[in-house]
């Protein structure tokens, strides 16, 4: 029970890293017929991808 904080940090690290890398993959490979919609969605995917990677790196540092 003494490592419960480390386990929770690790769980957040894995979740944020997975979602961040997946969002960056969607940023790279997502296509849509409407150009405005595509640009908006790609911007959202890039933001969430970078945010997820930053959270992952912060959790890695916290461990």
Image (cartoon, rainbow, N blue to C red):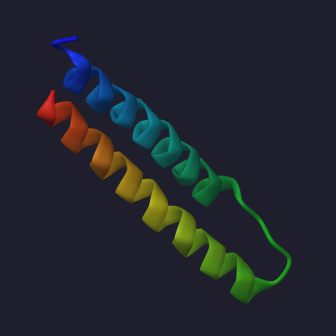
Compared with residue 21, is residue 45 higher up or lower down, i.e. above or below?
below
Which quarter of the picture shows residue 50? bottom left
**Direction bottom: furthest residue:** 36
Q: Please tell me which residue is depicted at 15% across the width and 12% down the height of the picture.
A: 2
Q: Count the marks: how many?
A: 0
Name the foreground residue: 33 vs 13: 13
Which quarter of the picture shows residue 14? top left
Is 41 left, or right, of 6 in this rendering?
Answer: right
Compared with residue 15, is residue 7 higher up or lower down, i.e. above or below?
above
Quadrant for the C terminus in the image: top left
Residue 15 lies, in percent from the top left, at: 46, 37
Residue 10 lies, in percent from the top left, at: 31, 26
Q: Please tell me which residue is depicted at 36% across the width and 36% down the height of the picture.
A: 12
Is 3 left, or right, of 15 in this rendering?
Answer: left
**Direction right: furthest residue:** 33
Compared with residue 37, is residue 51 higher up or lower down, i.e. above or below?
above
Quadrant for the N terminus in the image: top left
Name the foreground residue: 1 vs 49: 1
Is 60 left, or right, of 31 in this rendering?
Answer: left
Which quarter of the picture shows residue 44? bottom right
Residue 17 lies, in percent from the top left, at: 42, 38
Is 45 left, or right, of 13 in this rendering?
Answer: right
**Direction front: furthest residue:** 1
Q: Please tell me which residue is depicted at 71% across the width and 60% down the height of the picture.
A: 30
Name the foreground residue: 3 vs 40: 3
Compared with residue 1, is residue 39 higher up or lower down, i.e. above or below?
below
Q: Please tell me which residue is depicted at 29% across the width and 51% down the height of the picture.
A: 54
């Amino acid at each position: 029970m003494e490592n419960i904080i480390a386990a929770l940090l690790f769980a957040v690290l894995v979740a944020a890293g997975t979602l961040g890398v997946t969002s960056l993959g969607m940023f790279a490979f997502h296509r849509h017929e409407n150009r405005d919609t595509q640009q908006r969605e790609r911007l959202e995917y890039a933001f969430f991808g970078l945010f997820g990677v930053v959270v992952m790196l912060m959790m890695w540092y916290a461990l």
